[in-house]
């Protein structure tokens, strides 16, 4: 840690638990959080005055890059109109209409702020609609930090055989584990067996259609379609958690990209352009169970505040522009071709699974990962060193404690930025190359 950051961290530890506002914001590779002073476009500058190309991009929220003029305009307009918190506006109706146009499953929309909030309320809706309490989820997937889904997502190897009862945080009552059936991703036979075993108990199958939260595990051909068929057969809802995958490859999310329409989905992160905005979207018969039409409560002082809604509208206008996805595709092609070439030339066991503007980095794997068991083979020690090596050269990858997670670029990244990132990646991979031959250090 550099001087300003060290001083700040000392002060922060006195007023914020661990010195941070979000537990995973602590960057183990760097010895503290990245304290940022200013961000613009594809770059940010830290409190010590060093500038980095950002390959974290707000964990996927800053798909427009930082300080995009359209967002600044939207935020200013919200201020001028008086913020209007706790009122619905014409803008929110328009934005909901856009989401219904983009997303195959969307006939109705409810807005929330964070992704965790979205999955929390969506799961309540699924339970009310089906009259059942249990959910099938997949190990390696992440659906927010609340009690209903923070069980069985990322168990350590020794707990994998009992993933459904593995609580990922202290403070989650054991009673919540009775509602969880955690299965391996891409295993239709396991889903079918669980649906039979728990006949009439499962409300919903929830998943990330592309598992970003284990380093990027793609659905195998036929898996999503198979889930669609099985859930219909058993009267169970299919729920795509697209908080991360939405907008990364197109307006229609992973559901459009893979051609499988769920009953309900959650979207977020990029939607607010960097401000907190998420949404629950689904078929009308399900969504109309929300009060005041139906009997499911979903309310909040800060539901759809004008500030966030105008940011969302500005993001959508940008994403609809004819240059947006072609630019992401152009720099994506350059980045992925470049990184594939570096990995090939160095002869390293690294996988870079990708979905549009977001990708994983799995170190120590020779083949495309299939489920969370593959993610457990990722070399966390090398990931932490990789993050140190890239940060030293002015490119920021978040460390996620060394876990295989997701990284990405934004529409503000230029071809020149990508070329610089590739140079730095080549140096960083070369610097950790020898580590692959050694066994993992604790
Ligand atoms: C797939 C998925 N669902 C839910 C969440 C939770 O979103 P938030 O951090 O906005 O609460 C995330 C966040 O990373 C996510 O990737």
Image (tube, rainbow, N blue to C red):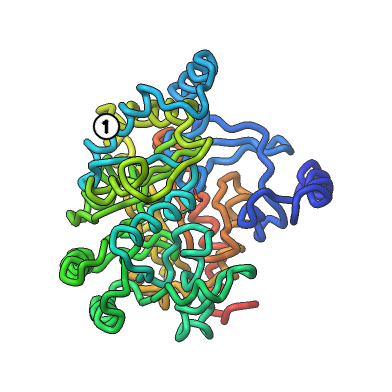
Percent position of residue 81, x then y: 50, 15
Percent position of residue 334, x then y: 34, 45
Quarter where residue 278 is shown: top left
Residue furthest to the top in view is 80
> Between 101 and 218, which is closer to the camera in this rendering?
101
Image side of residue 40 versus residue 195, left or right: right
What residue would you read off at disc 1? 97
Quarter where residue 120 is shown: bottom left
Tell me if I can see residue 262 in this picture: yes
Check disc 1: other Cα within 10 Å, few if <14, some if 14-19, many if 20+.
some
Q: Residue at x 53, y 60 (%)?
A: 146
Q: Is residue 276 above or below residue 13?
A: above
Q: Residue at x 24, y 82 (%)?
A: 196
Rendered-image quadrant of the C terminus: bottom right
Tell me if I can see residue 419 in this picture: no
Percent position of residue 26, x then y: 66, 55
Percent position of residue 259, x then y: 17, 54
> Between 354 and 394, which is closer to the camera in this rendering?
354
Image side of residue 161 versus residue 198, left or right: right
Image side of residue 403 versus residue 415, left or right: right
> Between 336 and 290, which is closer to the camera in this rendering?
290
Image side of residue 302 versus residue 388, left or right: left
Quarter where residue 224 is shown: bottom left
Q: Residue at x 43, y 49 (%)?
A: 118
Q: Is residue 229 above or below residue 125?
A: below
Number of numbered markers: 1
Q: Is residue 263 above or below residue 334?
A: below
């Amino acid at each position: 840690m550099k001087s300003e950051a060290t001083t700040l961290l000392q002060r922060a530890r006195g007023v914020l638990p661990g010195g941070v506002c979000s537990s995973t914001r602590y960057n183990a590779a760097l010895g503290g959080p990245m304290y940022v002073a200013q961000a613009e476009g594809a770059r940010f500058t830290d409190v010590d005055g060093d500038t980095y190309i950002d390959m974290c991009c707000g964990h996927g929220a800053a798909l427009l890059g930082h300080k995009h003029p359209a967002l600044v305009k939207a935020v200013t307009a919200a201020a001028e109109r008086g913020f209007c918190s706790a009122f619905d506006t014409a803008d929110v109706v328009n934005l909901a209409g856009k989401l219904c146009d983009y997303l195959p499953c969307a006939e109705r929309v409810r807005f929330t702020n964070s992704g965790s909030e979205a999955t929390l309320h969506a799961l309540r809706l699924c339970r009310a609609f089906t009259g059942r309490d249990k959910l099938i989820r997949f190990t390696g997937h992440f659906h927010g930090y609340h009690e209903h889904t923070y069980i069985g997502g990322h168990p350590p190897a020794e707990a994998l055989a009992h993933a459904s009862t593995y609580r990922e945080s202290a403070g989650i009552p054991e009673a919540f584990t009775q509602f969880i059936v955690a299965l391996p991703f891409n295993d239709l036979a396991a889903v079918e067996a669980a649906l039979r075993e728990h006949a009439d108990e499962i409300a919903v199958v929830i998943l990330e259609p592309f598992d970003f939260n284990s380093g990027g595990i793609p659905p195998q051909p036929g898996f999503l379609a198979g889930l669609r068929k099985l859930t219909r057969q058993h009267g169970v809802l299919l729920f795509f958690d697209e908080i991360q995958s939405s907008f990364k490859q197109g307006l229609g999310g992973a559901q459009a990209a893979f051609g499988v329409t769920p009953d309900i989905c959650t979207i977020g992160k990029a939607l607010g352009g960097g401000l907190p905005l998420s949404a629950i979207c689904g078929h009308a018969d399900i969504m109309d169970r929300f009060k005041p039409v139906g009997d499911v409560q979903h309310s909040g002082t800060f539901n759809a505040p004008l500030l966030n809604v105008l940011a969302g509208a500005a993001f959508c206008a940008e994403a609809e522009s004819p240059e947006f996805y072609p630019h992401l595709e152009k720099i994506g092609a350059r980045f992925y071709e470049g990184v594939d070439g570096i990995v090939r030339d160095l002869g390293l066991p690294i996988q870079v699974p990708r979905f549009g503007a977001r990708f994983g980095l799995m170190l120590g794997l020779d083949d495309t990962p299939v489920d969370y068991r593959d993610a457990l083979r990722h070399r966390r020690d090398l990931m932490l060193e990789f993050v140190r090596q890239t940060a030293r050269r002015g490119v920021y990858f978040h460390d996620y404690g060394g876990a295989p997670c997701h990284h990405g670029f934004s529409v503000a990244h230029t071809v020149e930025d990508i070329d610089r990132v590739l140079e730095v990646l080549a140096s960083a991979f070369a610097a950790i190359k020898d580590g692959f031959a050694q066994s993992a250090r604790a």
